[in-house]
Amino acid sequence: MINTHSNDISRAVGILRAGGLVAIPTETVYGLAADASHPEAIQKIFHAKQRPMTHPLIVHIGDISQLSDWAINISSEALLLARSFWPGPLTLILKKAPQVHSLVTGGQETIGLRIPNHPLALAVLKQLGQGIAAPSANRFGRISPTTAEAVREELGEAVDYVLDGGQCDVGVESTIVDMSSHPPMILRPGMITTTQIEQVLQMTLASQKKNTPRVSGSMESHYAPTTNTELMSTNDLKIFLNTPHEDIAFIIWSDLNNINVNQKNLKSISKNPRLYAHDLYQTMRELDKKNLKKIIIEKVPETSEWAAIIDRLQRATK
Ligand code: TXA
Ligand code: MG
């Protein structure tokens, strides 16, 4: 097999320049990257992901100075967030600049932008000197990949090259905040919390509308394993785990100290939300491969640090 799975920055950049697709690691999840100024390359993203053309893409840039290549009417609040959280897991929705191709924005007047915090992504952006359009590198509606192997499983030969940057640090997709209206509004929760954003802006954000149609990440069934997946309270699990379940997988975070029955497919992940987020998708992906009857996930605490995780768990179990 040809070597399509390493960390050759120049090769990645060469493929992007030629209008190809490269999977790149970011701190959140792997992205399926194309040169954002190359319409034919962008088309390939939609084809590879089997994603509807109306779903806009996030453009990744290497430096704040490139914001004005893609967006106009950039408010001081938007700049403040960019300076506070970039490079990092925050996407800003801004009014698009007139020259931005409508394929990137799904025909909308706004555009999503962020600077990712991963050395390989930043190296590619620097060498390419262009914005990179990159949705998560999964097939439409499926779990986002957090390793290079997971990208291959999702997209196979549809991606020309996979840049391997190891397992993603954050593990769930960026927080998306709409800065094109006032007050700003969270469209997708992420590990940068509403509270952190409100603290920086010194204002209260608008409350989130349910099911904003154009945000695919806000569709109810998304980030979902193929195996039937459901949530269960800690108390119900305590009872349920007293009998062995060969054909059910469990993802738990609390101690559940009284488990004395051996469960074949029980995965325990951290009670720290950051570490939990880091492991969640990879754990769901591993368990999904076992073709079991069901995956049962322990409900998590309902505090703001868990908001992104609660959101993804709800979508995975719809
Ligand atoms: O962490 C992330 O954001 C990852 C990494 C690769 O950067 N990317 C990612 O992209 O999650 P994607 O396409 O899987 O999810 C981006 C979400 C989609 O739900 C899309 O509809 C929404 O962002 N989005 C993009 N542009 C938008 C816009 N102009 N207005 C509203 N939503 C937008
Ligand atoms: Mg996605």
Image (tube, grey):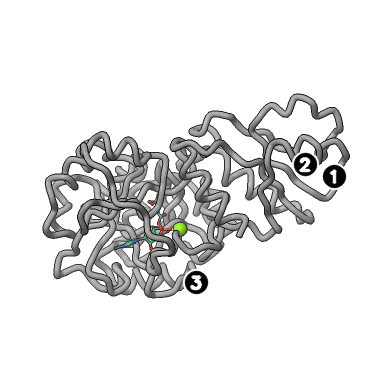
Element carrying mark 2: loop
Nearest the viewer among 8 and 54 is: 54
Identity of the amino acid at label 2?
Asn
Asked if the beta carbon under badge 2 is closer than 8 A to the nearest atom of ligand 2, the reply is no
**How far across and down, in percent of the image, does residue 291 sit?**
76, 56
116 lies above or below 4: above
For the N terminus, the quadrant is bottom right
Q: Where on the picture, by quarter, is residue 64?
A: top left
**What separation in Å lies between label 2 and label 3 (alpha carbons)?**
32 Å
Nearest the viewer among 39 and 204 is: 204
Marks 1 and 3: CB-CB under 8 Å? no
Identity of the amino acid at label 3?
Gln
Q: Which mark is residue 245?
A: 1
Residue highlighted by disc 2: 265
| In this view, the mark in front (1 or 3) | 1
Asked if residue 248 can be seen in this view, the reply is yes
